[in-house]
Amino acid sequence: MLIGEYIHTVDDKNRISLPARFRSQVGKHIVVTRGLDTCLFLYPLKEWQKFSEKLAGLSVGQSGSRGLNRFMLAGAAEVEVDSVGRILIPDFLKKFAGLGEKVVFAGMHNRVEIWDETRWAAYKEKVEGQADNLAEKLGEIGMI
C-alpha cells in the first residue's frame, strides 16, 4: 500500500528520486499522468493497466468520458526508474503540475500523487480546514 508524504528535490534534468518506501512497491516501470487538482498521478504499471481499462470502458458517446480519457491517457508517459531510484518527469507534465524545485510525493493507496511543495501546502491547509465537514459526509455514507 502506497501511503505517506515525502519531500524531494527536482534536479536540473527534471529527475526526482522516488521515496525509498515507494520504490519496491512501484517497480521499475511506472506511468505518470496528469492528475486532478493540478498534481501528477504516478501508477505502478499493474495499477495503471487496471485504471486505463476502466477509462477505456467509458462511453465514447458522452463528452465528459471522452474528455477524461483524453486528459488522462494522452497526458500519460511510461517512465523507468533508474538504478539509483530516480524518475524523469517529462517537460509537459512538469509544466502542467507547476513543479518547482521541491515536490511532495503523497501516497494514495494504489497510486502516488506528485505535487509542487507550495501547492501541496495550500491544498492541505484547505482540506484540513474542512475536516469536520468531510467526516460528516463520510459518516452519512457509513464510512466512519
Image: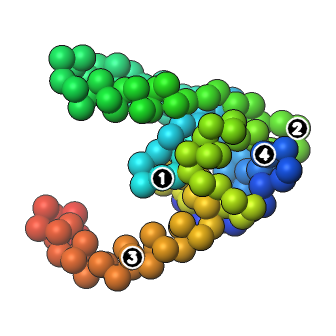
Query: Dot 2 surroundings within 10 Å: few (below 14), some, or many (20 or more)?
Result: few
Where is residue 119 drawn, in percent x and y?
54, 66
Q: Residue at x 67, y 51 (%)?
A: 22
Does any portion of residue 54 appear in the rendered image?
Answer: no
Q: Amino acid at mark 3?
A: Lys
Q: Left or right: 123 with respect to 56?
A: right
- Which residue is tagged 1? 38
Compared to 45, does 128 lie above or below?
below
Residue closer to the observer: 107 or 1? 107
Disc 1 + disc 2, Cβ < 8 Å: no
Q: Left or right: 125 with respect to 119?
A: left
SS of the residue under disc 2: loop
Residue that protrudes farthest toward the left in the picture = 140
- Ranked by sequence position, the earlier of labels 3 and 1 is 1
Q: Nearer the viewer, mark 2 or mark 4?
A: 4
SS of the residue under disc 4: loop
- Which residue is tagged 3? 126
Q: CA distance from mark 3 to mark 1?
A: 15 Å
Q: Amino acid at mark 1?
A: Thr
Total number of numbered labels?
4
Q: CA distance from mark 4 to mark 1?
A: 18 Å
Q: CA distance from mark 1 to mark 2?
A: 29 Å
- Quadrant for residue 60, please give it: top left
- Which residue is tagged 4? 14
Q: Amino acid at mark 2?
A: Ser
Task: Identify the image quadrant of the C terminus.
Answer: bottom left
- Which residue is tagged 2? 83
Disc 3 + disc 2, Cβ < 8 Å: no
Disc 3 + disc 1, Cβ < 8 Å: no
Residue closer to the observer: 25 or 43? 43
SS of the residue under disc 3: helix
Query: Dot 3 surroundings within 10 Å: few (below 14), some, or many (20 or more)?
Result: few
